[in-house]
Image (cartoon, grey):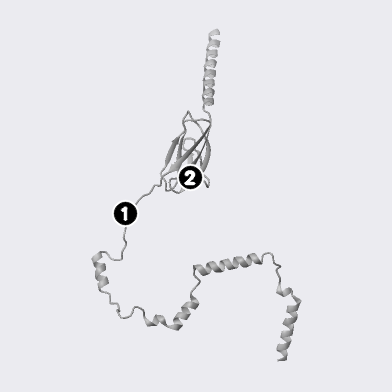
Amino acid sequence: MKVKYLVITLLALICWTGIANKAEAQQQKRAIQLSGIVMDTVAGPLPGVHVYIPKAGRGVTTNAVGFFSLVVLPGDSLVISSVGYKRRNYIVEPSDKEFVTIIVPMIEDVTYLKEIVIVPYPTEEVFKEAVLALNLPADKAIDDKNLNAELLALMLKTTPMDGTMNQRYALNQWATTQNDRFQPVTNPFLNPFNWVKFFNGLKKDKKK
């Protein structure tokens, strides 16, 4: 019986020692507040850049001025990525202090493709032959039919507004709305004088 109690006591001590060592190891993993700014080497701060820890499965995104901040552990490996830029990596050192601030420069990842020229002819020689075979009038560059006064007036009347005219119209509408915002809104159908004028007009029409 004494041997049995001794074995049980030894097993309990071993388990307790393992739990204590695990708790101590967890306490040694201190949290670090990592903050930084992600910048383009030319354009400046970059918004919307992903800063994440693949091992932990969490991360953040930089704000409008390229700033980010997240809690990390010593030894964590961060991946900093954005579309159009080369991926960067950052490893949290065990010697880092409680608060760490970094600046991450990003370099554009530009891929140059070979120039492609699209032509409606299979070869340059065929294209030259087609150009030389064209029969163009050399005396007049503009046909007189296109300078017809009625045709030009119709084109001017039916041509829609261009970008400048659309902008001017939108600004005028906005200015009118702002001026009328604090003015009283009247309904002509509720004006009795308008009804009097309307009935008087009907009477005049009947007399005629």
204 with respect to 64 (left or right): right
Which amino acid, by three-letter code, is at mark 1?
Lys
Determine whether the residue tagged by mark 1 lies in a helix, strand or loop.
Answer: loop
Where residue 82 sits in the image (x, y, percent)?
A: 45, 45
Q: From this view, report whether residue 202 is shown above or below residue 162.
A: below
> Picture quarter containing residue 131?
bottom left
Q: Where is residue 147 shown, x and y percent of the image?
A: 41, 81
The three-letter amino acid code for the residue at tag 2 is Val
Residue 159, given in percent of the width and then of the height, sits at 48, 74
Task: Look at the numbered disc 2 and give the secondary structure of its residue.
Answer: loop
* Residue placed under numbered mark 1 in the picture: 114
Residue 174 figure quarter? bottom right
Q: Dividing the picture into quarters, in which one does residue 191 lie?
A: bottom right
Check disc 2: other Cα within 10 Å, few if <14, some if 14-19, many if 20+: many
Between marks 1 and 2, how big is the CA–CA gap? 29 Å
- From the viewer's perspective, tell me whether residue 179 is left or right of residue 160: right
Residue at the far bottom: name it: 208
